Amino acid sequence: MGPVSDASEEIFDSPVGWVNRHIRSYVDSGGRKGHRHYGWPTLLLTTRGRRSGKLRRSALIYDRDGDSYVVVGSNGGKPEQPAWYLNLSADPRVTVQVGTEIFAAQARDATAEERAGMWERMLVVNPGYADYEKRAGKAGRQIPVVVLERA
């Protein structure tokens, strides 16, 4: 089961303005709007805050790998990992919304064998990740590639 155990529990959306507006459009339309965002396929990922215990929702670009979804923790190339990644590292049980479908999933880092191919496919989906990779690399951070598998 994902982190949403009680449908009445409040979910806190990303505080970043444009991300928050994207999430609101996605949620308010039941997933009919927002799945494609500026041409990119996006999903909503809900994690449990590692310190607060609150549910946190982010919008992320994704790719498919069989029945799984692949996302990356680019954080715009910043030196630190994104909060959603730190949260799922503490509790890998997540909730995912892709379009109108919502399901529980288990998150995990891609294995070393999987990562190279998945990263290359994510660069096709969003070539901007190459610049983020350079910036993160200068800070000594490898951008994580995360696999979301249905629970």
Image (cartoon, rainbow, N blue to C red):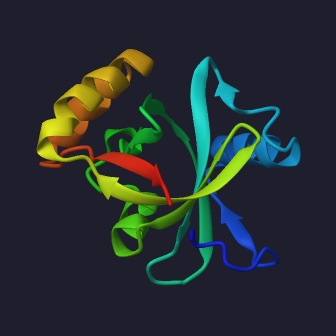
Quarter of image, res 126: top left
Question: Is 28 on the left or on the right of 94, as rendered?
Answer: right
38, above or below 75, in the image: above
Q: Nearer the viewer, residue 9 or 133?
A: 9
Number of numbered tags placed on the structure image: 0
Q: Nearer the viewer, residue 53 or 96?
A: 96
10, above or below 117, in the image: below
The x, y position of residue 109, in whole percent, is: 27, 53
Q: Residue at x 59, y 34 (%)?
A: 42
The x, y position of residue 96, in whole percent, is: 60, 52
Quarter of image, res 57: bottom right
Q: Residue at x 36, y 75 (%)?
A: 90
The x, y position of residue 62, in whole percent, is: 48, 34
115, above or below 123, in the image: below
Q: Residue at x 67, y 25 (%)?
A: 36
Q: Nearer the viewer, residue 125 or 19?
A: 125
Q: Residue at x 45, y 31 (%)?
A: 64
Question: Is 62 on the left or on the right of 141, as rendered?
Answer: right
**View extreme (right): residue:** 29
Quadrant where the N terminus lies? bottom right
Question: Is 79 on the left or on the right of 106, as rendered?
Answer: left
The x, y position of residue 106, in whole percent, is: 44, 61
